Image: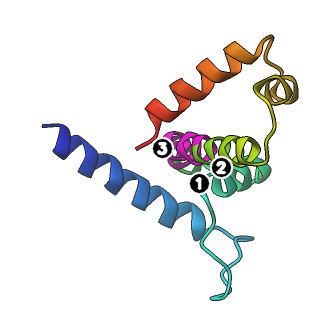
Amino acid sequence: MERNAEHAAAARSRVAREHLAALPDVPAAPTTPPPSAIDLIHLTLRRSAERTPEDLTHALTLLAEARAEVDGLEAGLLFAARSADLTWAQIADAMGFRSPQACQQHFTRLLARLP
């Protein structure tokens, strides 16, 4: 059953991306990468005068994908920071955590969410 839910979510995401990417103002040059879920959500919000309920529904569909993109970026930055010898205290300060331990715990939870 979980596999069917994953397929359904992937299909909804594909339809949402196709819908939002077809809106005006989305770069379509073949040399540019396809817009990210975050880019498409931003575009939908910026188009306040022209957006439709269907646009908003599709943008909402992409929220989970956008969260996954941000989680991946955050994990990459944290790995890069640690590889550059930043301490957990420095990272915690930059990210607004109250302690290095809280930052490390956040990182552990973040890794658990990633595929």
What span is in magenta? 56-71
Given residues 87 and 75, the one toward you in this image is 87
Residue beneath disc 1: 37
Q: Which mark is residue 47?
A: none
Q: Secondary structure at mark 2?
A: helix
Element carrying mark 1:
helix
15 left or right of 87 in image: left
Residue 21 in the image: above or below residue 73: below
- Which of 83 and 25 lies nearest the eye of the viewer? 83
Cα distance, mark 1 to mark 3?
9 Å
Instruction: Residue 41: give its label.
Output: 2
Q: For residue 98, which quarter of the picture?
A: top right
Q: Residue at x 41, y 60 (%)?
A: 15
Q: In x, y percent, where is residue 3?
A: 18, 45
Q: Amino acid at mark 2?
A: Ile
The CA distance from mark 1 to mark 2 is: 6 Å
**Residue 35 relative to residue 2: left or right:** right
Please report the residue visible at 59 percent of the width from the left and 72 percent of the height from the top: 34
Residue under label 3, please give it: 61
As drawn, the residue found furthest toward the front would be 85
- Residue 108's x, y, as percent? 54, 26
Decide whether the magenta segment is chiefly helix, strand or loop: helix
Q: Crowding at label 2, few (<14), some or many (≥20) Cα neighbours within 10 Å?
A: many
Whether residues under marks 3 and 2 lie with C-beta atoms below 8 angstroms apart, the answer is no
- Residues at circles 1 and 2 in contact by the CB criterion of under 8 Å: yes
Q: Residue furthest top?
A: 98
Residue 44 x/y as whole percent: 68, 51
Above-or-below relation of 45 to 31 = above
Q: Which of the image's four quarters has the C terminus?
A: top left
Kindly identify the amino acid type of the residue bearing the numbered disc 3: Thr
